[in-house]
Structure formats: C-alpha cells, structure tokens
Amino acid sequence: MTFLIQQTLLYAVPLMIVALAGVFAERSGIINLALEGIMIFGAFIGVLFVRIMQGSAWIGAAKAANAYGTLQLFGVLAMLMAAIFGALFSLLLSFASINLRADQTIGGTALNLMAPALALFFIRLIANQNTLYIDGDGPSWFMIKKAMFGYGRTEKMSWLGETFVNKMYLATYICIILFIVLSILLYKTRFGLRLRACGENPQAADSLGINVYHMRYAGTTISGALAGMGGFVYALTTANCTSNGDVAGFGFLALAVMIFGNWKPLNIAGASLLFGLFKCIAAAYSSIDINGDGIYMLKEIGINENVYRMLPYVITLIVLAFTSKSSRAPKAEGIPYDKGQR
C-alpha cells in the first residue's frame, strides 16, 4: 500500500500543478493548449541545469559531505530554472494571442510542435544522442531519505513516515504547497478576482479600469511557469531525470483533468489523484502488492500489459464523455479582446 500511495502521488502531482497552469491561462481568457510543449521544454531545461551543475565543485563537496540539504536546494534551483524558461516560452503564446490576436488553438498547437523539436535539437547538440541523461545517482539526490532524520539503514520509520517521507521527493511537496497558495491567490485575492473577470467579461473589467492585456499576460506567464516546473517534476520523479522531447501526454492529460475538475482547484486535486492512480497501475501493475501479503494480484490476473497501459487514456475518454456537458468554461476564453467591442 505504501508503494501504491507513493507512486500515485508521483504521477498525480505533476498533473495537478500543470492542470492549475491551464486554469490560470483560461481564467484570464487564453486557451493554453501548449501545456504539453511547455512541459517538454521545462523538463529539458531542468535536466540540462542538473547536468551542468553536476560536475561543479559545489555539488562534489555536498556529495562528499552527505549534505542532503544542499542537494535538495540544488533541486529547488532546477525547478526554478524550469519555471523561468517555461514562463519565457509561454510568452510566444501570449504575444500571438494578445498582440496579434491569432487563433489560440493554432498558437498552442504550434508550440506543442516546436517544443520537442527544440528540445531534441539541443539534446543532439549537447549529448549527441536522443536522450539527455543525468550521470550516476543524480535523481536520488533530490529524494527525502530517513537518514536525514537520524534513522539507520536497518531502522524503519512509522507507516506515515515510510509512506509520506522516506524516498519521497521534496519537489512533490513544493508543488502541493504551490498548488494551495496559488489556488488561494486565484479565488481569495484582488488579483485573482481581476484575472477571472478578464476571462468572463473583459469589457466589463476594462470599464472598471482593469488592464485586460496585462492580466492576460500575467495569467499566461504564470501558466507557463507552472507547466515548465511540472515538466521538470515529471522528468525528475517518473522519468528518472531524463529528457527526450516527450512527457507521455501528461500535458494533454492535464487539460482533461482541468475540464473534469470544472476549472476549480479542489476538483482538480481529486481528479489528479484519480488519474494518478490509473497511471500508477499502468506503469507498475506487476509490482503492486495491495494487501502486503506478497501476492501481486494485478499481475497474476493475466490481463495483457497493454490493457493496463491504455487505462489512463480510456478512463480519460470515459470521464470526459460523462462530464463535459456539465463543465462550464470561462465565457471569454479563446476570444481575442477588442476594446471597441461591447
């Protein structure tokens, strides 16, 4: 059960933070279909930053001294770099959608096509291969380990400790905290009210002195930062800190989570856990011991492994088929703002 909970969280948290990225853009009135592409770009930047810093004297000294805190800080810096470049990459969508009034669906699709091409071009340039790897035990640096709390190798923590602390990633909890803080920002602050007003009735917002263009830039930039960070967290926690121009459709799955959650953070969190569970089953069905009795039931049922791999996407289609009619998108999303229109 510990393994199932940990793996579900590892899959659910990137979905959750990227779905929230979509909410920020769409609540401001911009359809961000480029979440997949921004994730790919953020994953590449984060992994590249880790790779560059891996050979530095600072990291070497921290490894030699078992300075876990320093290594964790290094992981946070990689998340920050992925967020910054994700935000910069999203400015292409902002400029096309707001200044040029281009079709937002086409703009997002173009970024989704451009991001893997850019990532693979630079990966080939840097590593002369199609995947950018982190050497050695790099990904394990960013794990929270029981040794940090004074436990020996043979000692065990409590069930809560083993489930939610030992071998979990600090990045997972940073994303959860960010999700809570930004949800409060979106629904309980003046900035959030103005942002949502621009996605519902930008003309009315403008008549009250709110700069619709600035708010839409802000929403899309925050969206890009969160998606870039989510891309690196995905690469770190589920792809063994590698970048290959692909995030297994997590960006599109995050869009489905956002729609299923009706653009509301609490619903999105629940939907992310549901989809995270099925992604966990798809990826590790042969290693899941539900009752702790040494029997891997899902493996012994005899179902073809491809059926498990299809599960998250089949569930997505089923859920969207039943919930899309009741979903209410922001009224002005996807509509270029025209000051003269009433």
Image (cartoon, rainbow, N blue to C red):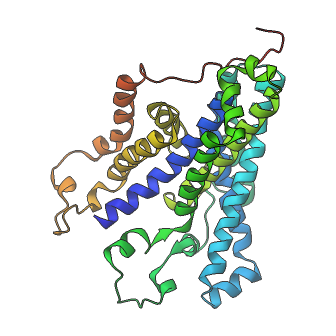
**In x, y percent, where is residue 22?**
60, 36
In this view of the protein, which residue sits in the foreground, 260 or 196?
196
The answer to whether any part of residue 183 appears in the image is yes
Quadrant location of residue 323? top left
Give the x, y percent position of residue 45: 70, 55
- As drawn, 278 above or below 201: below
Q: In this orientation, does residue 29 appear?
A: no
**The N terminus lies in quadrant:** bottom left
Quadrant location of residue 112? top right
Question: In the figure, 72 relative to 248: above or below?
Answer: below
Residue 229 position within the rendered picture, expressed as x and y whole percent measured from the top left: 64, 53
Q: Which residue appears at 28% of the width and 41% of the height?
A: 307
Question: Where the C terminus falls, by quadrant?
Answer: top right
Q: Nearer the viewer, residue 228 or 266?
A: 266
Is residue 151 left or right of 46 when viewed as pictured? left
Q: Which residue is pictured at 33% across the width and 65% down the height?
A: 3
337 to the left or right of 17:
right
Q: Nearer the viewer, residue 227 or 38?
A: 227
Q: How many marks?
A: 0
Viewer-side residue, 197 vs 326:
197
Using the image, determine if residue 75 lies above or below residue 182: below
- Residue 303 x, y percent position in the rendering: 20, 45
The residue sitting at 60% across, 88% down in the picture is: 66
For the point 41% across and 91% down, the residue is 152
Image side of residue 252 versus residue 189, left or right: left
